[in-house]
Amino acid sequence: MTRHDGFPDDFIWGCATASYQIEGATQEDGRGVSIWDTFAHTPGKVAGGDTGDIACDSYHRYLEDIALLRELNANAYRFSTAWPRIQPEGSGAPNQKGLDYYDRVVDALLESGIEPWMQLYHWDLPQALEDRGGWVNRETAYRFLDFAQIMFRHFGDRIRHFSSLNEPWCVAFLGYLQGVQAPGKTDRRLAHRAVHHLLLAHGLAQRAYRESGLPGAFGIVLNPARQRPATARPEDIEAADRAAIESTRIWLDPLYGRGYPELFMQLFGADIPMEEGDLDIIASPPDFLGINYYFEQAIKAVPVDGQHPYGCALAETWHPKTAMGWDIVPEGMLRLLRYIAGTWPVSELYVTENGVAFDDVPDSQGIVHDANRIAYLRSHLHACRDAIAEGIPLKGYFLWSLMDNFEWAYGYQKRFGIVRIDPVTLHRIPKKSFYYYRDVIAGFGL
């Protein structure tokens, strides 16, 4: 059945958040130190010297957050678990108080008729593992397997959708090459080693989930890109194809049994710490693929050099931009979904993050009239509807984010939420976009 707005009756409507961005309580109930605790407390790494020590205080206010989801009538909530809350040192027996917290969250969601979607890893690696090399160290993939198995055993009776990693591109390239995210390294060779170990971690966890006999689905969440060529000249078209190698193909090709792209291996194969059987562990298509989309880039051809190993670079564009400086290109979402569905045999696709940061200013009553966010969401939801009409297996949409939160290296300066968090009281105040999304879920937003 299809609703009058073009979305199937069983389409999943949700919101998404991440543990370090909302939970706070970083030193409570046995939680260990994460790489983001270390990074945020390093002077100069995060705007304004902000940290996630308190964030949205969702560790104590999760019932308020779930009440907001219920008011929206969202039927799913994608949240991540803090690995150092479960295993403070990244290994060993689980911390019962950490499990108890997520028990409370999961049970409260189910009692409210909201399906919990558990993201196992959204960047907050235990610092103890980073001290031994982090994702550059093969051991971390096996410690992730141990962590995942703890979560499967404890929550598998209630969670029907687990996903392994969120945006591993950011983990590898922003964390180990560009240094703008934790752990703040700047070495391309380390980034490539991290790529392989992240994929290995996913493959190990997915195999364990399937061997567990649990009845749910297991996936991975990527932020792939299908960059468009700046012109119709062959050199720009080819450059755009090469740009997709690092953003997309080095993740999806191995997952679907195609190995790493040939050009990537020609350039950087010596960096990959391949061991016998690794690609077989990785090469198991996920039950579902999560796609995070915010913007599309234009690409032009440039000479190959150390800064441009693929011979491509960003081209200037005309599009209006968000507070993050990202182009607003709703058509790019449709192009990306077409590319993914047409290139790899994906069975189920979900938009697991989509949203926008603007410089929200509350009025005298503390309300944010964010018509610009509403326009962004509406245009991107039209792209989702068009994808469904074309036969692309898009099954759900998770808005990023339920509330303003700690936006990584930007601290609290960039606000993606449809709920405003008062910076003093932490009181939750729905923005006008909150009520727009409520209409969307009810079938009236488009």
Image (cartoon, rainbow, N blue to C red):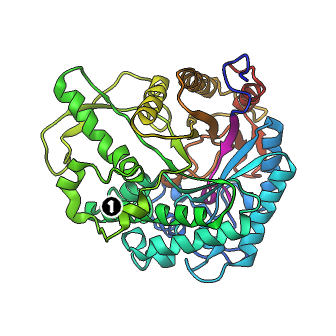
Tally of marks:
1
Using residue 130 as the reference point, say whether residue 212 is left or right of it: right
Q: How far across and how far down the image is residue 198, in percent?
A: 43, 62
Q: Is residue 433 above or below residue 172?
A: above
Callout 1, which amino acid? Ala
Q: How far across and how far down the image is residue 77, in percent?
A: 71, 47
Magenta stretch: give its range. 12-23
Q: How far across and how far down the image is residue 11, in percent?
A: 69, 33
Using residue 33 as the reference point, say whether residue 200 is left or right of it: left
Q: Is residue 407 above or below residue 152?
A: above
Q: Nearer the viewer, residue 121 or 386?
A: 386
Which residue position holds label 1?
191
Going 31% across and 61% down the picture, which residue do you hit? 192
Q: In the displayed image of the protein, which residue is found farthest to the bottom? A: 92
Q: Nearer the viewer, residue 426 or 407?
A: 407
Regarding residue 77, the answer to whether it shows in the image is yes
Classify residue 15 by image quadrant. top right
